[in-house]
Amino acid sequence: MSSELFYKPVSELADALAAKTISSIELTQAIVARTKAVDPKVKAFNSFDEADALAQAKLSDERRAAGQARGPLDGIPVGMKDVISVAGQPLTASSKMLANFVSPYDATVTKKLKNAGAICWGRLNLDEFAMGSSTENSAFHTTCNPYDLERVPGGSSGGSAAAVAAGEAIVSLGSDTGGSIRQPAALCNVVGLKPTYGLVSRYGLIAFASSLDQIGPFSRSVEDAAITLGAIAGHDPLDSTSFKTEIPNYRAELAKRKGPWRLGIPKEYFGAGLDPEVAAAVEKAINYYEKLGCEVKNVSLPHTEYGVGVYYIIATAECSSNLARYDGIRYGHRSKDAKDIVDLYFKSRAEGFGAEVKRRIILGTYVLSSGYYDAYYLRAQKVRTLIRQDFLNAYKEVDAILTPTSPTPAFKRGAKADPLAMYLCDVYTIGVNLAGLPGISVPCGFSKGGLPIGLQIIGQPFQEAELLAIANSYEKAHDWSAQRPNL
Amino acid sequence: MAAPTDLNIDHVAHLARLALTPEEKAKFATQLGDVLAYIEQLKKVDVSGVEATAHAYPVFNVWADDVAQPGLPVEAALKNAPAQRNNMIVVPKVVE
């Protein structure tokens, strides 16, 4: 294998590792060198541990030499969002609150990746506690979009998306509460998959909004997403919301499922606020499926317009509850000038949290507070039911739904200083979380200014194999991912 | 352009055990006023007879066998504590 090992897909690297034309040490060294070369510009990482990565690679090579290689991810560096625990490594959530925290144990996804032989690589930047759509809310630094360093990579998993786009990881993991995998994937020209709620264990993921959070992969191909999902999916007794379901061989299923599919186009996702270049690119992608012989029909998701409102009640309510644990007592930042224990709570939280986290804690506490619970939280949970029913009704007629992932391509840093404007970035991704569905973003073109555009495909619960096959069909005919950023 | 709301920042910040500066209070009141004004549209939806969704994929009554499992050793559990002594976390004095 020649140059640019760091841009090869898992599928190809796995063959080369199996044929011993490369070693995991060589591959990991290539990733480390690439990261050192480009990360001063991209700033995808909060930190990385070169010695640890090379030690993992050495073990992989030794396993292989002994005839005990473990499958396609053995020896492959996988970037980790800095909200997923890796024992002995920092876990900051890009917050001052956890600036010095070191994970005492592995998340279930980490354990599964290690069992598959993967090399857990680096700590990837995000909006603090995964709250945001641009990584500008990181307490440490803003990650840059590899396709235009003046612009944001999206968020909250901006570091995970940018690292894969820039060749600083072969694949990576992120988490998606309202679009935090799919939106940055769209903005950075990579594939991003949010699995069905319950498919992937949340044990060891820093909790933001527990009824919405899911871990999922970023990759430069749908096949690599299938391989990575296969490694991390499955029931976990340590997460009581994880679901007992058969995990198919997603990669093998790609070739077996060829359609034609019945695809729905929801008019509510193509209205005001949608950038014309994004609309045009998505319509071209829809045309591809029509030419393939798919039945493409209009569907209606009538409660779409309420999604953002429902989300910012439910997500902030859950966050205000989940983040109550950061009180300066057992771990995390402790204020040095508190006069008593209660003052310690107030000051540690004030010093440890950034502005967006504080805003969401205030909003979430308010909507749960006495006298307002019914008007806000309970009502939002009921509208959530209607949003979920909209999707389930549509799935009586179609196999999957096609929409834009983000209403616009990547915006410039500082362009959305108003929180409400930032919240509306998630207008097309939020419904999927509220309904607990799987959704994938695949690259579907570029704006005239050279900015990536993503197509979102929304699947039925636990039908990831079909969803990936639909995405794979489009990708095989286009492969926008081949257009690398100029770094 | 914040709409008038009942949001009493001092009260809510106290409930959340969060010390806010006067600047933060003023800023959040305006910004969250905008967000709450936006959220008002949920009142248009007829939710009579609709059940609340707590989890998108309902899983009920998950039981585990009542068997002790190995946990974190004390040293590992205390590793991130801001202050510790004799295998305990040190906190400011609670009673006078």
Image (spheres, rainbow, N blue to C red):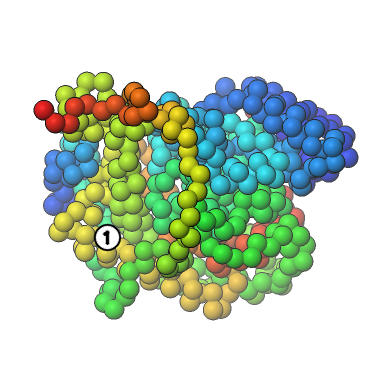
Looking at the image, which is closer to me, A282 or A70? A70
Looking at the image, which is closer to me, B94 or B47? B94
Identify the residue at the far left of this view. Answer: B96
| Label 1 chain ID | A
In the figure, is residue A484 to the left or right of A426?
Answer: right
Picture residue at 41% right of the left edge, 53% below the top: A210
Q: Secondary structure at mark 1?
A: helix
Residue A118: x percent and y percent? 69, 40
Looking at the image, which is closer to me, A116 or A263? A116
Can I make out residue A277 in this image? no
The quarter of the image holding the N terminus of chain A is: top right
Kind of residue indicated by mark 1 = Tyr
Residue where numbered disc 1 is placed: A377
The quarter of the image holding the C terminus of chain A is: top right
Can I make out residue B52 in this image? yes
In the figure, is residue A6 to the left or right of B81?
Answer: right
Decide: is B84 above or below B13.
Answer: above
Give residue A386's quadrant in the image: bottom left
Looking at the image, which is closer to me, A451 or A135? A135
Packing grade of label 1 (10 A; few <14, some 14-19, many >=20) is: many
Picture residue at 70% right of the left edge, 45% below the top: A116
Picture residue at 21% right of the left edge, 63% below the top: A375
In the figure, is residue A486 to the left or right of A377?
Answer: right
Residue A281: x percent and y percent? 60, 54
Q: How many marks?
A: 1
Residue A238: x percent and y percent? 50, 52
